[in-house]
Image (spheres, rainbow, N blue to C red):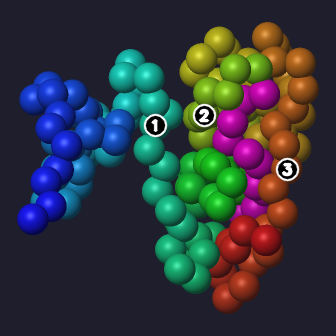
Amino acid sequence: MTREAPTAPDAPAAGLTRRRALCGLAVALAAPGVLAACSSAGDGGAPATPAPPPGGTPVSSIPVGSGTVVQGPNGPVLLVQPTAGTVEAYSAVCPHQQVTVDPPVDGTITCPGHGSQFAAATGALEKGPAESGLTPVSTRIVDGAVQLA
């Protein structure tokens, strides 16, 4: 007979917090608006980013003049569509303190951590405290979907 090692009743299992468990349950039940409420900001983790669909992220799902953050193989990726039909991709991790940046508004990507700003069309630094722009991510468009290369 195999016995499991006892654990403290209030110790989180493998990084599982009450918030993450409840959010996971809510997402599983497809409750609307849960992703925004389940951001793990404040509990020491990074906000959750959705994985791109198996065929890639449809270009039509990326708002023109804005963008969306998806989970790439090496971390979060910001896909932006500065103008219709033009898609750019950058690491969504701010080079200042590794906070996930927000999708662009009015052509500017902003880091919610310390306010660094980047150009949506190029990822170039517009305002610090970051000292460099966002790292470009290679992509290709296949059958109307953005695939991370």
Q: Residue furthest front?
A: 1
| Residue that numbered label 1 is attached to | 47
Look at the image and tell me in which quarter the N terminus lies. Answer: bottom left
Q: Which badge, 1 or 2, is on the more N-terminal residue?
A: 1
Is residue 72 depicted above or below 136 in this figure? below
Q: Which badge, 1 or 3, is on the more N-terminal residue?
A: 1
| Residue that numbered label 3 is attached to | 136
Look at the image and tell me in which quarter the C terminus lies. Answer: bottom right
Type of amino acid at the residue the image marks with label 2? Thr
Is residue 129 depicted above or below 59 in this figure? above
Quarter of the rendering containing residue 126: top right
**Nearer to the camera, 124 or 45:** 45
- Residue at 81 percent across and 18 percent down: it is 130
Label 1 and label 3: CA atoms lie apart by 21 Å
For label 2, the SS is: loop
Image x and y of residue 111, in percent: 65, 24
Image x and y of residue 34, in percent: 25, 44
What range is drawn magenta here? 84-95
Disc number at residue 24? Answer: none
Type of amino acid at the residue the image marks with label 1? Pro
Label 2 and label 3: CA atoms lie apart by 15 Å
Label 1 and label 2: CA atoms lie apart by 7 Å
Quarter of the rendering containing residue 139: bottom right
Q: Which badge, 2 or 3, is on the more N-terminal residue?
A: 2
Disc number at residue 100? Answer: 2
- Residue at 82 percent across and 37 percent down: it is 134
Is residue 58 depicted above or below 23 in this figure? below
Let me know if residue 92 is in the magenta part: yes
For the residues labelled 1 and 2, say whether their Cβ atoms are less than 8 Å apart.
Answer: yes
For label 3, the SS is: loop
